Amino acid sequence: MPEGDTVWRTAQRLHRALAGEPLVTSDLRFPSVATIDLRGGTTLEVISRGKHLLHRIDHEGRAVTVHSHLKMEGQWRVEATADARGWLRRADLRAALGTTTWTALGLRLGTLDVVPTAGEADLVGHLGPDVLGPDWDATTAVANLCASDTTIGAALLDQRNLAGVGTLWASESLFLERLHPWAPAADLDPAAVDALVARAHALLVAARAHPIQTSTGSRRKGEETFVHARSGRPCRRCGDTVRVAMIGPPGRERTMFSCPTCQGGIAPTDDGRPQRPLGSSRGRSSPYRRA
């Protein structure tokens, strides 16, 4: 699932392409909004809120917001309007909003809503502090995590505690801070949680400047991360084998990568058997190969 830095860059790209110009294309292909026509409206701004996109439009004197979430496979592209006709025929197109110059194309979107801008809180009001937001509040984020009744890994992924962190940045932040993802959040020293939040914030701030996500500083393929997507491979710090397991409440489990040596052991559900490196074709298969 695209994380906060990816969604932030998407918002910036859409804003640069559409802001200040009247819409001449409006094609929304979710049943709940399919009859809404926003042509003639003018884009005021496009911003991110955690992993959510808010496209604010002045339409016939009313402020409305097109809200979208990319979920696992969604994306927004920007194409020159003169070249967008072929994209409009795609079966996976869920939204098209364009000016005479540029057209934004939403593909495989997970959600799409149109609401009065004043009602945005109904869609994103449950979110915790936005890690990349102008009103980022680290103190509240730390307090939310410390008050959580789940593991620190699951708490870090819960968007109600802080918004924008996904499995990539959760795995990397926990590794860099040497924290066991399955440790109860409430049992951790608040200073350790404060350092974890600062680490996650720093990683996302750095990542939003470049489309290749890296925590190691290298953008070479295969060198971008310490543990994420590296199960079955040696830890870059100690040489032990990185492992992957599921974390989170039933029905909302996510993948978590960690180093047993650097982070204090394996997951409670990990049977300790060998895990095949992601993308390999030999050896014992990991049940999380597609994580």
Image (cartoon, helix red, strand yellow):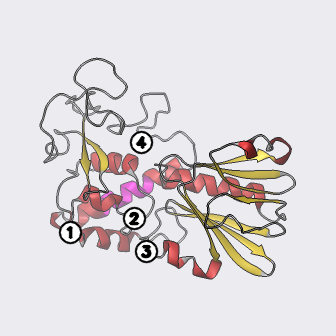
Q: Which residue is mark 1?
A: 149
Q: Counting other residues with Cα less than 10 Å from the Cα at mark 1, is it few (<14), some (14-19), or many (20 or more)?
A: few
What is the CA distance from the residue labelled 3 to the residue labelled 2? Answer: 8 Å
How many circles with numbers are drawn on the protein? 4
Q: Is residue 122 left or right of residue 27?
A: left
Label disc, if present, on residue 19 of the rendered structure = none
Label disc, if present, on residue 159 of the rendered structure = 2
Task: Evaluate if marks 3 and 1 touch, with contact meaning CB atoms under 8 Å apart.
Answer: no
What is the CA distance from the residue labelled 2 to the residue labelled 4? Answer: 21 Å
What is the CA distance from the residue labelled 1 to the residue labelled 2? Answer: 15 Å
Tell me the magenta residue range: 194-202
Task: Evaluate if marks 1 and 2 touch, with contact meaning CB atoms under 8 Å apart.
Answer: no
Q: Which residue is mark 4?
A: 215
**Disc 1 residue type (three-letter):** Asp
Q: Is residue 72 left or right of residue 153?
A: right
Any magenta on residue 2?
no
